[in-house]
Image (tube, rainbow, N blue to C red):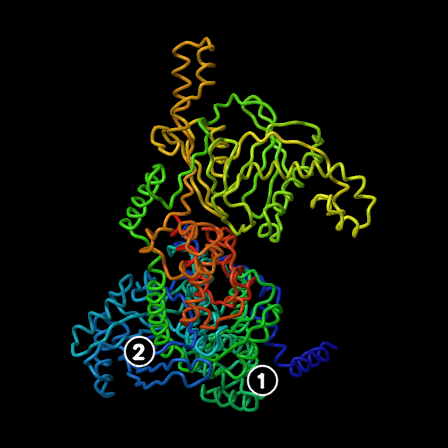
């Protein structure tokens, strides 16, 4: 009976599917989606750690800034020399980039020559290695007859981890692959190359940029695909880079724009983050490497180690009698006998099993058909794990990009290079499938790089030159907005001269210096209820203010001033204001109250008393007729009278038909608005003061701070007021200097002490002056700082040639100045790829509120891009940077 069971067991083992045998043996290498998502989450945490200045030193994933700030846009051009060092040989190339060809292949022409690197140099001194590189470069220049009369820009692809402080500087962090060159770790590789070129002599080249192969791959693919923001290498080694928002990169100053980050993800797991996914075969590969404990992730996925992993698995299974009837050859015991090229050959679609048999035979093994199936399956599991791990890392990067951009879905292209990706028949398909499964909300396109590292380094240099040229042109355009200290001092002197001239009775001044007849600022003892009316923009505000014990309670209501009222007749405007006041009093339940009222009228007025003000001119878009040259307080009083008179018609009007109302000459105009007539209430106002908003601002702040003697407005318009010595105000000396007879008589009858009289005189020694400084420059005094964009805005305004200072500084015009600058930059091809949209051509579309929405923190660029999207302007990150700079300079120009 035992014999029967033994035979049955042996028969079952003989008939067992060889792939299932391998699956059981390598179960730890077969990763399911939950494990991949876990690995992806761990990698995202490592990325965050590497980007932080506080944790970068201890981070396994270094996240090295490359100082590559932009991807190609297809307008790059020029001729470059390129060096590509990263393997057992290196290349020297001449690269020609043709402008405007980025939308199709053929925009880059290359000639190259491959030079071997003697093995002894890979472990020799750094100077010897770079002398060899330099001599090879000289040989190439001579062979290609490249002229030495002009300096040639050189791009350097250096495929080892480096810390960059700028694009043409990089300190070697450590060697990888099979390099062990002495004396270069921690040194500037570009400086070493320049010194070698100088020692060799006879060359006229300038090293402008150094990048690694991953960055170069992204740039190569980005030349033909504007969505390419990720580079991926899966070859002898592995790495990934991507474009990160600079606001998230602590290691680089500044927060505007983007920068390519070289993740150096090969070091993922060096801190133990992958310990629970590492197998005994991974540990054996690591222990036998020339850098134990380093580049753990790379040793699990890259071409330098895949073949060795397969060999170790096959060897162990053979030793356990699971392959080749337990037979093990000396070749199978030899490190490196199974290469990644063998792994790729084993997985060929039709010839894979035959290739497997041939490879095993070359190893002095006598495989059975089942042995060939099993070894092929081992190769599949090892390479599949590699593509799965790469997919998990890539999913982490894409998730971060999507989150940074605050997008629900992400359209992006990944540029890929490397021998594993290019030569393994199943690898690309497996990688693509898993990435899309892990990130279904991302539309990911994979593009194979064409001569990636060499061509890409030249493109990095071309982009750097394009950005430098762009920077120069933008600086030239914006230069007039950058005022020097000398220019600001001149403006200050002209402003002071204008202020002093405005105080005099003789001569003219663009700055009006209007007396306000406000002699005192609050001292905190004020009390009582007051009505306040405020007209100065597109809204009218009515307020009831109650002053009590150094506190003020305020109730208000805001009313819109329709454009047709702003630009209609004066009677219509003031009737509308009277209607708003009536509604407010009714709203407050104060229709029968008789309160003192102050009228804030934020337009230039000449005053002869505190309760009179003759409108000098409209500003801020107002054009109501029959107002300029008239007392605005009288106009408001007349409007109130018209409204009160209309009450006796109230009953009759409500009973009339609309035609009867319109044709009745005795009905006041306000009552012909039958629809509102039923809401009218009788009221009266005691308007005791009229001031502009600037004076009102000063008084409001002085209530809180008695030292406040200046009021400043920087809003839709701009103005300033201040307390001036009465003795300096020539305009009012005749009125103020001599008290009238009634006042003299009162003084005689008043039993006051001499001290009290002096105090009163002291209190009347100052008067608030409403400067109306917006008119500075109306006489041409600012012509030397006015830009062409200011001139354009002035010509298109409703009052050309007037309020020049206001048009340089106030909110009503800043957005339009920005639009004019953006329009000019776009027409010059410096913005939005030169595409002038109808939106950009529309006056007023760029509202000043957009400038105030843009914060100075790290979210500023996102806010700019959001505003551009709202306006239908499709811009790149570089466009957003320029737009923000235009906005910043325009605002600085106002200060």
728 lies above or below 494: above
Residue 400's tag is none
Nearest to the observer: residue 409 or residue 581: 581
* Total count of labels: 2
Q: Residue furthest right?
A: 655
Residue sitting at x 39%, y 27%: 766
Mark nearer the viewer, 1 or 2: 2
Q: Nearer the viewer, residue 739 or 845?
A: 739
| Residue pointed to by mark 1 | 373
Crowding near pointer 2: few (<14 within 10 Å), some, many (20+)? many
Q: Residue at x 53, y 66 (%)?
A: 839
CA separation in Å, label 1 and label 2: 45 Å
Nearest the camera: 22 or 686?
686
Residue identifier under label 2: 82
Few, some or many residues within 10 Å of mark 1 (<14, 14–19, 20+): many
Task: For residue 733, say whether it is visible.
Answer: yes
Label 1 secondary element: helix
Q: Position of residue 758 (x, y in %)?
A: 38, 16
Which residue is pictured at 26% across the width and 63% down the height?
187
Residue 223 drawn above or below residue 563:
below
Left or right, 665 with reference to 617: right
Q: Is residue 404 visible?
A: no
x and y, in percent, of residue 408 in the image:
61, 63
Sequence-earlier tag: 1 or 2: 2
Looking at the picture, does residue 696 appear above or below residue 326? above
Q: Nearer the viewer, residue 343 or 205?
A: 205
Quarter of the image for the N terminus: give it.
Answer: bottom right
Residue placed at 45% from the left, 51% from the top?
856
């Amino acid at each position: 009976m035992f014999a029967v069971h033994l035979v049955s067991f042996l028969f079952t083992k003989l008939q067992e599917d060889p792939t299932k045998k391998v699956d059981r043996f390598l179960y730890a290498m077969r990763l399911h989606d939950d494990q991949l998502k876990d690995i992806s989450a761990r990698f995202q945490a490592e990325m965050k750690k590497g980007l932080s200045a506080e944790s970068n030193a201890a981070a396994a994933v270094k996240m090295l800034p490359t100082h590559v700030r932009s991807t190609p846009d297809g307008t790059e051009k020029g001729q470059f020399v390129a060096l590509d060092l990263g393997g057992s040989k290196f290349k020297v190339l001449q690269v020609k980039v043709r402008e405007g060809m980025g939308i199709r292949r053929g925009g880059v022409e290359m000639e190259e020559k491959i030079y071997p690197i003697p093995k002894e140099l890979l472990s020799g001194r750094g100077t010897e290695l770079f002398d060899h590189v330099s001599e090879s470069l000289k040989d190439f220049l001579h062979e290609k007859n490249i002229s030495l009369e002009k300096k040639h820009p050189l791009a350097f692809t250096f495929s080892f981890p480096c810390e960059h402080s700028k694009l043409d500087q990089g300190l070697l962090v450590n060697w990888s692959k099979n390099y062990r060159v002495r004396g270069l770790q921690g040194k500037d590789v570009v400086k070493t190359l320049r010194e070698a070129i100088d020692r060799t002599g006879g060359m006229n080249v300038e090293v402008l940029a150094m990048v690694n192969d991953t960055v170069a791959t992204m740039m190569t693919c980005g030349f033909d695909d504007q969505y390419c923001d990720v580079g991926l290498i899966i070859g002898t080694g592995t790495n990934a880079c991507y474009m990160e928002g600079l606001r998230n990169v602590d290691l680089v100053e500044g927060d505007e724009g983007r920068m390519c980050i070289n993740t150096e993800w090969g070091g993922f797991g060096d801190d133990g983050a992958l310990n629970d996914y590492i197998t005994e075969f991974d540990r054996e590969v690591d222990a036998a490497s020339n850098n134990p404990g380093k580049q753990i992730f790379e040793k699990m996925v890259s071409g330098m180690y895949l073949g060795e992993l397969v060999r170790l698995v096959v060897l162990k299974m053979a030793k356990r009698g699971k392959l080749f009837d337990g037979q093990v050859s000396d070749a199978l015991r030899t490190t490196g006998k199974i290469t990644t090229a063998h792994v790729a050959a084993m997985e060929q679609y039709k010839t894979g099993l035959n290739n497997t048999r041939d490879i095993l035979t070359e190893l002095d093994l006598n495989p059975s058909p089942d042995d060939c199936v099993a070894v092929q399956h081992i190769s599949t599991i090892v390479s599949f794990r590699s593509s799965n791990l790469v997919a998990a890392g890539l999913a982490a990067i894409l998730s971060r990009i999507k989150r940074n951009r605050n997008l629900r879905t992400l359209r992006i292209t990944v540029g890929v290079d490397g021998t594993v990706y290019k030569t393994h028949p199943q690898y690309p398909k497996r990688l693509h499938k898993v990435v899309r499964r892990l990130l279904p909300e991302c539309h990911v396109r994979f593009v194979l790089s064409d001569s990636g590292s060499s061509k890409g380094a030249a493109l990095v240099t071309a982009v750097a030159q394009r950005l430098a040229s762009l920077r120069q042109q933008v600086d030239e355009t914006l230069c007039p907005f950058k005022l020097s200290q000398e220019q600001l001092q001149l403006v200050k002197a002209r402003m002071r001269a204008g202020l002093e001239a405005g105080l005099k009775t003789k001569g003219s001044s663009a700055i009006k210096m209007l007396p306000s007849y406000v002699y005192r600022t609050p001292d905190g003892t004020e009390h009582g209820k007051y009505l306040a009316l405020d007209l100065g923009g597109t809204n009218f505000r009515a307020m009831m203010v109650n002053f009590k014990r150094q506190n003020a309670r305020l109730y208000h209501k805001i009313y819109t001033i329709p454009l047709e009222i702003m630009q209609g007749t004066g009677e219509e405007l003031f009737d509308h204001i009277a209607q708003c006041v009536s509604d407010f009093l009714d709203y407050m339940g104060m229709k029968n109250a008789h309160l003192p009222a102050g009228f804030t009228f934020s337009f230039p007025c000449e005053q002869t008393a505190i309760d009179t003000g003759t409108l000098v001119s409209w500003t801020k878009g107002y054009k109501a007729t029959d107002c300029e040259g008239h007392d605005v307080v009288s106009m408001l009083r007349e409007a109130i009278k018209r409204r009160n008179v209309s009450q006796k018609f109230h009953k009759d009007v409500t009973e009339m038909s609309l035609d009867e109302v319109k044709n009745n000459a005795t009905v006041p105009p306000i009552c012909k608005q039958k629809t509102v007539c039923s809401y009218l209430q009788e009221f009266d106002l005691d308007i005791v003061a009229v001031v502009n908003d600037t004076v009102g601002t000063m008084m409001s702040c002085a209530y809180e701070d008695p030292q406040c003697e200046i009021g400043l407005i920087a809003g839709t318009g701009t103005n300033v007021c201040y307390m001036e010595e009465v003795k300096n105000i020539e305009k009012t000396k005749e009125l103020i200097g001599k008290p009238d007879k009634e006042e003299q008589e009162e003084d005689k009858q008043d039993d006051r002490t001499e001290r009290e009289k002096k105090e009163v005189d002291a209190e009347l020694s100052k008067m608030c002056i409403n400067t109306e400084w917006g008119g500075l420059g109306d006489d041409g005094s600012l012509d030397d700082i006015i830009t062409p964009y200011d001139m354009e805005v002035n010509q298109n305004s409703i009052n050309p040639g007037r309020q020049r200072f206001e048009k340089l500084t106030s909110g009503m015009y800043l957005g339009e100045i920005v639009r004019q600058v953006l329009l000019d930059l776009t027409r010059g091809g410096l913005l939005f790829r030169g595409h002038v949209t109808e939106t950009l051509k529309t006056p007023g579309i760029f509202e000043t509120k957009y400038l105030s929405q843009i914060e100075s923190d790290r979210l500023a660029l996102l806010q700019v891009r959001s505003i551009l999207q709202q306006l239908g302007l499709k811009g790149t990150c570089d466009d957003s940077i320029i737009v923000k700079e235009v906005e910043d300079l325009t605002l600085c120009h106002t200060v």
